[in-house]
Amino acid sequence: MRGLLLTRRQKRASWPGYMALRANTVKDARLKRFYDNSQLTPDTPISEAPLVAMDMETTGLDASRHGIVSVGLIPFNLKRIRLAEKRYWVVRPRRELLRESVVFHHITHSEIASAPDLDDILDELLACLAGRIAVVHFRHIERPFLDHALRERTKESLMFPMIDTMQLEARLHRRRRRIWVKRLLGLRPTSIRLQASRERYHLPAYQSHHALSDALATAELLQAQIANRFRPETPIGRLWS
């Protein structure tokens, strides 16, 4: 019960302690290296934080029933997106590739037949994430899917702080009073999907449902959000979840 009584600020501040604890308790060497390299504190200004945009395509939306089919990563900061350091993997899920999901991500059975298992790229994937803050659009995909995949392969969980650009949009456009007023007036709530959010900052349209292009779109969106709604000295503890 005590954990349920923590304030949102306390939960955000608790990430460093959690990461340090995991570094001392995990058994998998790859996970230990990852947690050992997580040194950022909640008061680190966002302008000084090394960031990495991450996106995944999956066979569905339920981490317990579906699997990861691709991962895209792009390191960046508020001034520069490091496209030369981008990483992209197609991986073979341990769940059936559903016909419905192929329509979205266009990754076919023949592509995944020769693709590596996530476990085969895990060392490289974690090395790209280590010491950086992951930036995603809707963490309720990336976080549970990665955690479930690691539990299957290592019997250990993988949890770490993320900055969720969808959540940052929700703070502005999905406040309860604002939604209630719109419904009263017969208006639809403001969309906080990736492309709709980018349009509000006059960012161009990119191909959707590709892990690499969505990672790039997410990196640019965070840069625009900070430039328009926050300050470079905003502590990451106010942004991560």
Image: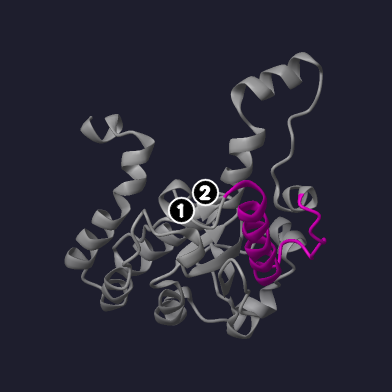
Image position of 128 (left or right of 69): left
Give the overall secondary structure of the magenta segment: helix
Q: Residues within 10 Å of mark 2 (few under 14, many from 20)?
A: few
Residue 5 % position (x, y): 28, 29
Q: Are marks 2 and 1 in contact (CB under 8 Å)?
A: yes
Identify the residue under disc 1.
Answer: 144
* Residue 127 or residue 172, whichever sits in front: 172
Q: What's the colour scheme?
A: one colour
Residue 221, by quadrant, is bottom right
Residue 116 % position (x, y): 52, 81
Write the residue at 51% across / 63% down. Answer: 47
Question: Which type of secondary structure does the marked residue at label 2 adopt?
Answer: helix
Write the residue at 60% across / 51% down. Answer: 165
Instruction: Give yes or no for residue 68 being in the magenta stretch.
Output: no
Question: Which type of secondary structure does the marked residue at label 1 adopt?
Answer: helix
Residue type at mark 1: give it.
Answer: Pro
- Which residues are drawn in magenta? 201-230
Mark 2 and mark 1: span between their CA atoms?
Answer: 6 Å
* Residue 56 or residue 42, whichever sits in front: 42
* Residue 109 or residue 67, whichever sits in front: 67
Identify the residue under disc 2.
Answer: 140
**Image: 81 above or below 63:** below
Image position of 152 (left or right of 65): left
